[in-house]
Image (tube, rainbow, N blue to C red):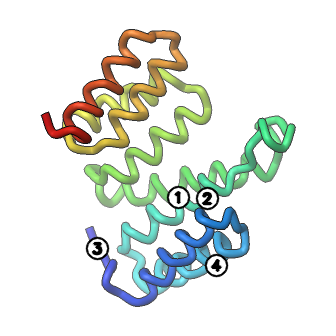
Amino acid sequence: MHLLVTDPTIKLGNLFYRLARKNRSQTYMTRALEVFKSVVRIDREDAYSRVAMGILEYERLPDPYRTGKIQDDYSYVRQFQASRDWFQRVLMREPSNLYAAHGLGMLLFEQMKLDDAKRVFQTLKEHYPRHVGAWINLGHVYMMQDRPVRCVVSFTLITLTHYFNT
């Protein structure tokens, strides 16, 4: 994996991303997208920027509960596909990239393809047991599948093993 985290451009993209999250600002989100797109144009192998692009596109998805729009809205579909494409591009080059796989799992969850999302998160949990996001999202899948015992077990295990180091 080409991690250019020390590169000033990547740091700038991360800064815009953090500002966008903190201030809920589409302006900063757009700037972060522009920065990471410029990195991808320069270094076509950079998985970090590609995963960042997938995450940014995912986070820009319109919230159908907040906006009242249905999920087949054109902008939703376009951004959803863009997010998926970024994650898939990384996985085609690096099939073991856990961040891209996690991103695809989130998208499957978003589409309510719960069995597929569960498979992704279970695989991540088995291969990368310290990846907290896989455990948490697996708990969310169980919650949506109305399996409260498995949900509680997943959340309890992650809390005990990762947050309290027991």
- SS for tag 2? helix
At label 1, the amino acid type is Gly
Q: Nearer the viewer, residue 156 or 79?
A: 156
At label 4, the amino acid type is Arg
Residue at the spot x=72%, y=74% of the render?
27
Relative image position of residue 60 (x, y in whole percent): 67, 57
Closer to the observer: label 2 or label 4? 4
At label 3, the amino acid type is His
| Farthest-out residue, right | 68
Which residue has dot 4 on it? 31
Query: Is 116 on the left-hand or right-hand side of 113?
Result: left
Q: Nearer the viewer, residue 45 or 159?
A: 159
Camera sees residue 129: no
Choose the circle earlier in sequence order: 3 or 4: 3
Which residue has dot 1 on it? 54
Measured in 3D between alpha carbons, the distance from the residue under mark 2 to the one under mark 4, in whole angstroms, is 12 Å
Give the class, few, some or many, for how many residues have Cα within 10 Å of label 4's Cα (few <14, many ≥20): some
Which residue has dot 2 on it? 57
Choose the circle earlier in sequence order: 4 or 1: 4
